[in-house]
Image (cartoon, rainbow, N blue to C red):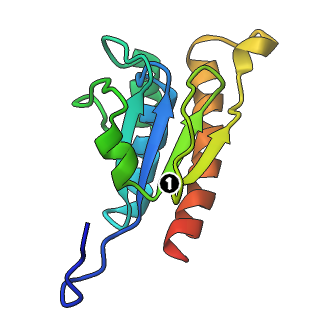
Amino acid sequence: MTHDPNSPPMPPSVLFVCSKNGGKSQLAAGLMNQLAAGRVAVHSAGTKPGKSLNPQAVGSLSELGIDIAGEHPKPVTDYTLDAVDAVIILGSEAKLEPRAGTRFEVWDTDEPSERGIEGMERMRLVRDDIQARVQKLYAELTGD
């Protein structure tokens, strides 16, 4: 993709990936969209997209004033992988091959269910873990 030197610079872009694109990657995308306010182009996708969003993920973000109810699980595409600056995989279920020239990270996110924590309490802990990582990534992508 060529860029016109007279147009404003393209914002950095990130793709958040999990297996179903119903929970963790949607959490990360919602959190980044709120934080970046347009300064980062945000995408999310799943390696095996589910049928709907995790209602607890939606609820945990609405507690922070973030509405993702209009989102839906989407598949990972070569087009998106080629278009982004960074690919972030959340959790251990999703598998993707790194792309040359693209920042590629796997976030081994907190899994409270391994400690017997379930329901909304689990989702809030997952959300808060992802939020801290998103804040660090945002600073790295934007230089803020």
- Horizontally, is 24 left or right of 11 in the view? right
Q: Nearer the viewer, residue 62 or 78?
A: 78
Give above or below for 91 relative to 35. above
Of the residues shown, which amino acid type is indicated by label 1? Answer: Ala
Q: Nearer the viewer, residue 101 or 86?
A: 101
Q: Residue 128 occupies which quadrant of the picture?
A: top right
Quadrant the N terminus occupies: bottom left
- Horizontally, is 110 left or right of 25 in the view? right
Give above or below for 22 relative to 116. below
Dot 1 falls on a residue whose secondary structure is strand
Give above or below for 103 relative to 46. below
For this orientation, the residue located farthest to the bottom is 6
> Residue 44 location in percent, x, y?
38, 38
Which residue appears at 41% of the width and 65% of the height? 12
> Residue 53 location in percent, x, y?
36, 19
Decide if residue 8 is in sight here.
yes
Decide if residue 64 is in sight here.
no
Q: Nearer the viewer, residue 35 or 106?
A: 106
Q: Nearer the viewer, residue 137 or 6?
A: 6
Quadrant the C terminus occupies: bottom right
> Residue 6 location in percent, x, y?
19, 90
For this orientation, the residue located farthest to the front is 100
Q: Residue 11 occupies which quadrant of the picture?
A: bottom left
Q: Which residue is mark 1?
A: 86
Mark 1 packing: few (<14 Cα in 10 Å), some, or many (20+)?
Answer: many
- Horizontally, is 4 left or right of 13 in the view? left
Number of dots carrying numbers = 1
> Residue 48 location in percent, x, y?
42, 16
Which residue appears at 57% of the width and 24% of the height? 123
